[in-house]
Image (tube, grey):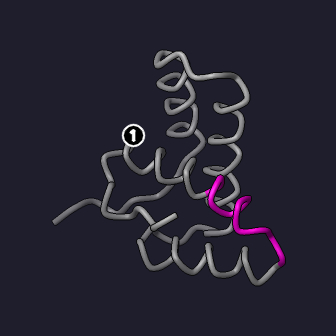
Amino acid sequence: MRKKFEITEKEVARFAGYLRQEEREDSTIESYLRAARRFATWLDGRVVTKELAATWKTQLLEQGYRPVSVNAMLAGLNRFFDFAGRPECRVKV
């Protein structure tokens, strides 16, 4: 059984280092980190699941975010999930 998956600031910092090592643009790094942190805040201590990621996507759209903006956030979040070894949490963009 897999360990519960929570997004911590320590994990986000490790993700930032990984993105820098991969020579990503500063704007891309900031966008991806912002998405991971925003999702973590929205989770409010809940354990990460694909279902919650999909719910977040729906709520962003309901809040009036344009689909292109939501997709950009999901691209960053999905990249974080890959980095964290949790590709099963990815949500379709």
**Residue 43 part of the magenta-drawn span:** no
Q: In this view, does 66 lie to the left or right of 3?
A: right
* Residue at the (72%, 74%) spot, across then down: 60
The percent coordinates of residue 9 (x first, y second) are: 60, 42
Quadrant in which residue 27 is drawn: top right
Q: In this view, does 62 lie above or below 22?
A: below
Which residue is the extreme one toward the right? 64
- Identify the residue shown where x is 57% and y is 58%: 74
State left or right for residue 7 relative to residue 56.
left
* Residue at (57% x, 31% y) in the render: 13
Characterize the local packing of mark 1: few (<14), some (14-19) or many (20 or more) Cα atoms within 10 angstroms. Answer: some
**Disc 1 designates what residue?**
83
What residue span does the magenta drawing correspond to?
A: 64-73
Q: Main secondary structure of the magenta part?
A: helix
Identified at 52% across, 26% down, the residue is 19
SS category of the residue bearing label 1: helix
Image spot of residue 21 (x, y percent): 48, 15
